Image: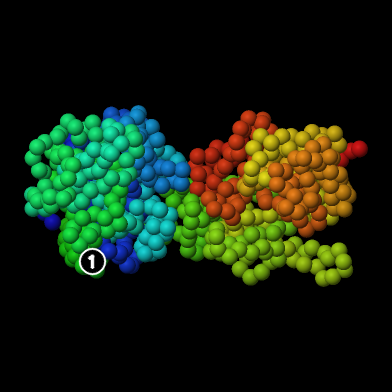
Amino acid sequence: MSNAARNQTMKRHPDTAAFIPPELAFQATQPPPGEDWLHELKYDGYRVQAVANGNDVRLLTRKGLDWTHRMQHVADALAALKLRDAVLDGEVVVLNARGQSDFAALQVAFQGDGSGLVYYVFDLLFLAGKDLRAFPLMGRKARLKQLLSAAGKGATVRFSEHIAGAGEELFAEACRMGAEGIVSKRANSAYRSGRQPDWLKMKCYKRQELVIGGFTLPKNHSRGIGSLLLGYYRDGELIHAGRTGTGFTDRSGQDLRQRLEKIKTEKLPFESMERAARKDAIWVEPKIVCEVSFANWTTDGMVRQASFQGIREDKSAREVTREDALETEKLVSKSERVSKSASQRARQSAEQPGRPEVVGAPGFSPAKTAAKKRGFSPGAVALPIKLTHPEKILDPESGVTKEQLADYLLAVTNVMLPHVEGRPLSLFRCPNGVGGQCFYQKHTGKGMPAGVSGVEIPDRKGGAAEEYVTITAPEGLVGMAQMGVLEVHPWGARNKTLEKPDRLIFDLDPDPALPWTTVVEAAVRIRKRLARYGLKTTFVKLSGGKGLHVVAPVTPKLEWPEIKLFCRRVAEQIEAEAPQLYLIRMSKADRVGKIFIDYLRNERGATAVAPWCPRARPGMPVAVPLSWDELLKQKKMPVFRVADFAKWQERVAKDPWKKMAAVRQQIRG
């Protein structure tokens, strides 16, 4: 490499408004094998290049159009990062309730003020004016992750996570979650504009852009669309590819009709078209690109069962061609040839003085980067344990991985540990995640992580003592993730005072048909009743299911039989006040329209799910503590999930159960 070429790599970006044509992916039949490839989720949004220098931020589409004014929230978020002469590459999306990118919702957001947009960044092209495109992708992404860490979890600007290797597993999981697919990128590749074999995309279902060449009127005579006549370009001619008459909402159909009315033409836009296919057609100039999903291509080249997904304003009609997946093996072979050529050039460059230093995190290895669900990424603090298979999906609905569970447990350790440490535990283990085979474990066994040991529990009937699991250090709580433990259930007594509980627990389990306000009223009744007996300080938490737990701390003086008898008496009194609403019998047949008051949590050996603990249920909800004031304001049951922790993590600092350990009270009367 000449000195001039080497200096070009280090030069400053010539113009903060300049546009770099993006690198594009070939569509492949399957993910490439091996650890040399990084795999990312494929986003269903608009490709956006960000050119940022402090407060000066420009957001450009894949064709170089300046859309900053349409994505001002994203521009503001980037400005807050105070990047210096940086160029970022990523995708702007809108996430639905399941945390997945939703193209229809993105269309709606652009029709409004652009709020709700999220910018997933997957590449760093320039930083501090230095051109990084010649450096390996894994190094660029490592530096990018450092830059975006200041944005925090759940921010508008987010780092696009990836895994190294295991492409087939990620692709299968992406399709199972309902994602569009994945993009695989060669880890050591440079960034090169245009479609390159170093980037491959695999789609879970057939979907592509097509050009609108005409439309028909709806049969109900509304101002919407009956169907769209579609095509793609081949050798400069628009090839007819069928039609779609589904996927429109009333609003999108009317908006599209207005746009098409303005570009009507008498000229047939397609190269050729059967007469039957022209029936009732109104021709338009082939200017507008839309995206459709469809079952497959028919033998005569038509899209079958196509459904309209939205307009692609970021793409020009002339660049729309038919997308057919190419053999992965051939694409990988081509990529390897390109990579080999690049490596030879890099070796030649290394022999010359003044070679620029590669930007990347020290010791960074793409093979160690775990797959993470968008909207949730690990914290800045390193895990105190070693995880095997950190990318393993534990909850198919939310996509939470083993590493994400460990990250969550680490984040809540300070508030959760006081309620589980030094107590006998019952662990609910799900090695294959939510929906797989699960089991309770209360005894110690092989492979216990650091911070987990055993406590001997005497047999009250004279048998041999049993060794129960107990946590003795913070790393023990985080180690639950390595064991596949999704729920931790502690006793109501500590190891030092096994026979004398230090908290009472009332589990309110309502008929799902009952309104949330009725469940809240039941919790308030118990709170008031306990106050009559000297227990004036009580705490409440979501069960992580459909009910609530009311907890009263007590000085450990009374033994289990006395505690159980007292709790039964309180439950019976509540039942007697409104027998049409409350019951204490366990029979499910009697619970219709009622709230079951489970007082049996207050006997020796019984447990209840710990506060801040996830539940082994679809979506992985969490048993989150609430203050009484907050509970009374809730008109419907709040739900907190591990996958959404970034949105509610501030609760940890405001823990309403923080003062429980300092409470000193006894049962009176």
Identify the element where label 1 is drawn.
loop
Give 15 or 96, whichever is nearer the viewer: 96
Q: Position of residue 205 (x, y in %)?
A: 32, 56
Q: Quadrant of the N terminus?
A: bottom left
Left or right: 96 in relation to 72: right
User: Vertically, is 21 above or below 443?
Assistant: above
Q: Position of residue 669 (x, y in %)?
A: 91, 38
Q: Residues within 10 Å of mark 1 (few under 14, many from 20)?
A: few
Number of numbered labels in the structure image = 1
Residue located at (14% from left, 39% from top): 283
- Say which amino acid is labelled 1: Glu
Which quadrant of the view contains residue 449? bottom right
Residue located at (74% from left, 34% from top): 524
User: Vertically, is 428 above or below 239?
Assistant: below
Which quadrant of the view contains residue 33? bottom left
Colour mode of the rendering: rainbow
Inspect this view and state whether residue 185 appears: no
Residue located at (33% from left, 33% from top): 251
Inspect this view and state whether residue 440 appears: yes
Left or right: 507 in relation to 93: right
Q: Position of residue 301 (x, y in %)?
A: 18, 58
Q: Identify the residue position indicated by label 1 in the image.
A: 327
Left or right: 1 in relation to 514: left
Give 152 or 311, whichever is nearer the viewer: 311
User: Vertically, is 455 above or below 87?
Assistant: below
Left or right: 519 in relation to 203: right
Residue located at (66% from left, 34% from top): 517
Q: Residue lying farthest right?
A: 669
Q: Position of residue 214 (x, y in %)?
A: 17, 41
